[in-house]
Amino acid sequence: MRFVQKVSVSLLATTMIILPIRADDNKTAEKYQTLSAQLITDAKLALTQGKADDAQLMFERALVANPANVEALIGLGNTYETKGQTGKGLRYYRQALELEPNDQTALSAQSLAFLKQNLYDRAELNRDKLARICAAGCDALNIVEVALEAYRAAEADKDTQKVADAGDVSSN
């Protein structure tokens, strides 16, 4: 299956090289953007159906069709997180933010991934940036604030449990 995926991506890349996009050929550019958008739609569906490998392939193809597609980068980040590879997911969120530094979806997804990696301070920095970007509030900011609060509560519970466990040991 992996071989087929690589061949498919290679074929699409080869097609793009053989049929270069000319500056005056907007129709070709539009076709690649449309292809990229359709692949993203299909990849998101595959991911919701638990088909992470299929989603990954489609997001990769979407990037071949349109290398500046931030949505495809975020989708790959989500896919890798779904597969338990948060570090790889973070790399794709970073790439998305290099292209679109204020992308709310990328900032939110990266924040949640930071929390999975116990990088609370970095998640807070993203929350602060989201607060500046959407001063009136937005879904991405709300999601990150809820996640930060849950993280703080979980850490407080751990501390409480450690104290309780230490008391149990000393009473024996």
Image (cartoon, grey):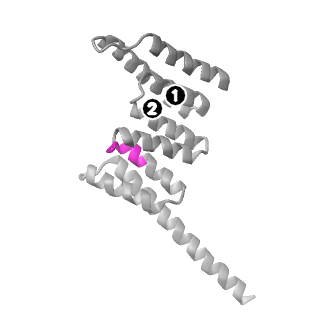
Position of the N terminus by quadrant: top right
User: Residue 8 sits in which quadrant?
Assistant: top right
Q: Residue at x 27, y 49 (%)?
A: 133
Residue 100 position (above or below residue 112): above
Magenta-highlighted residues:
101-108
Task: Rate crowding at label 2 as few (under 14), some (14 to 19) or many (20 or more) other CA atoms within 10 Å.
Answer: many
Q: Secondary structure at mark 2?
A: helix
| Percent position of residue 53, x then y | 61, 31
User: Type of residue at label 2?
Assistant: Ala
Residue projecting furthest to the bottom: 171
- Left or right placement of residue 50 versus residue 36 in this view: right
Tag 2 and tag 1, C-beta contact below 8 Å: yes
- Left or right placement of residue 155 versus residue 162 in this view: left
21 part of magenta stretch: no
User: Type of residue at label 1?
Assistant: Glu
104 part of magenta stretch: yes
User: Residue 31 sits in which quadrant?
Assistant: top left
Residue 141 position (above or below residue 51): below
| Percent position of residue 127, x then y | 36, 56
Q: Secondary structure at mark 1?
A: helix
| Percent position of residue 23, x then y | 29, 15
Q: Measure the alpha-carbon separation of dots 2 and 1.
A: 7 Å
Q: Residue at x 66, y 85 (%)?
A: 167
Residue located beneath label 2 in the image: 72
Q: Residue at x 56, y 31 (%)?
A: 56
Residue located beneath label 1 in the image: 60
| Percent position of residue 109, x then y | 44, 46
Number of the label disc, if any, that sits on residue 146: none
Residue 52 position (above or below residue 64): below
